[in-house]
Amino acid sequence: MKKRKTPPVPGWMAITTKQPVFIPNATGDGVAETVMQEVPAWKDPKTGQIYLDGTAHEILDAVKARHLGILLPEQLRDLRNSIGMTQKKMAELLQLGEKTWTRWETGAERPSRSMNLLLCALHEGKIDVGYLRSKRQMPALDRPAMGAPVEAAIPAKIGVAETPANYGK
């Protein structure tokens, strides 16, 4: 592990420590497994207290994500780059808000479990971008269903009550 040279507080010592990572069960209401992970930390020599910084928390989060099968922010960025899309285009492809993908890619937030399944399938080549693009072009709701008469798609005239007798007029 990379040692940091400047402590956050003068006099603190750089150390490594093992920290528990609690892996939740499938329902999220308990712990399925506890994994010990070595991380860099800082020790206050006066109190003996150990402090974890952002680097340590990133390592612990990555361990939990790996055990849960969640793609890490770096993997999301690599996925997007591999298909040649901007963050905005990726959000459009997945029918997300513009900033949602950016938050996932920076690690500020994580995708839901169901979205993660879709992203894993895309990452592993189980589905391709063409498939997702085809799903973005869903038929409009006012188009007739397959086999329905064409006149069912004609909107009612303004001011004409929509009754079965007036459909298509």
Image (cartoon, grey):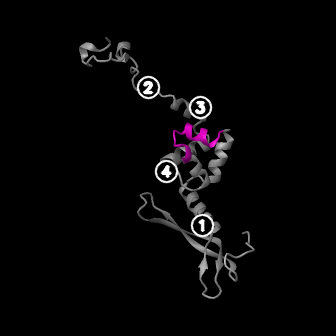
Disc 3 secondary structure class: helix
Name the residue carrying label 1.
57
Name the residue carrying label 2.
140
Mark positioned earlier in the residue sequence (4 or 3): 4
Picture residue at 48% right of the left edge, 47% below the top: 114
Name the residue carrying label 4.
112
Mark positioned earlier in the residue sequence (2 or 1): 1
Disc 4 residue type? Ser
Mark 4–mark 2 CB contact (< 8 Å): no
What range is drawn magenta here?
A: 85-99
Disc 1 residue type? His
Is 112 part of what is drawn in magenta?
no
Disc 1 secondary structure class: helix
Disc 2 secondary structure class: loop
Q: Residues within 10 Å of mark 2 (few under 14, many from 20)?
A: few
Q: Could you tell whether 45 is left or right of 26 in the image? A: right
- In 3D space, how far apart are the residues under numbered discs 3 and 1 (Cα atoms)? 37 Å
Mark positioned earlier in the residue sequence (1 or 4): 1
Disc 4 secondary structure class: loop
Picture coordinates of residue 9, whole percent (x, y): 67, 79
Residue 26: which numbered mark, if any? none
Foreground of the two, 91 or 115 = 91
Residue 88 vertical placement versus 12 (above, below): above
Name the residue carrying label 3.
130
Quadrant, the C terminus:
top left
Picture coordinates of residue 10, whole percent (x, y): 70, 81
Mark positioned earlier in the residue sequence (4 or 2): 4
Quarter of the image where one finds residue 141: top left
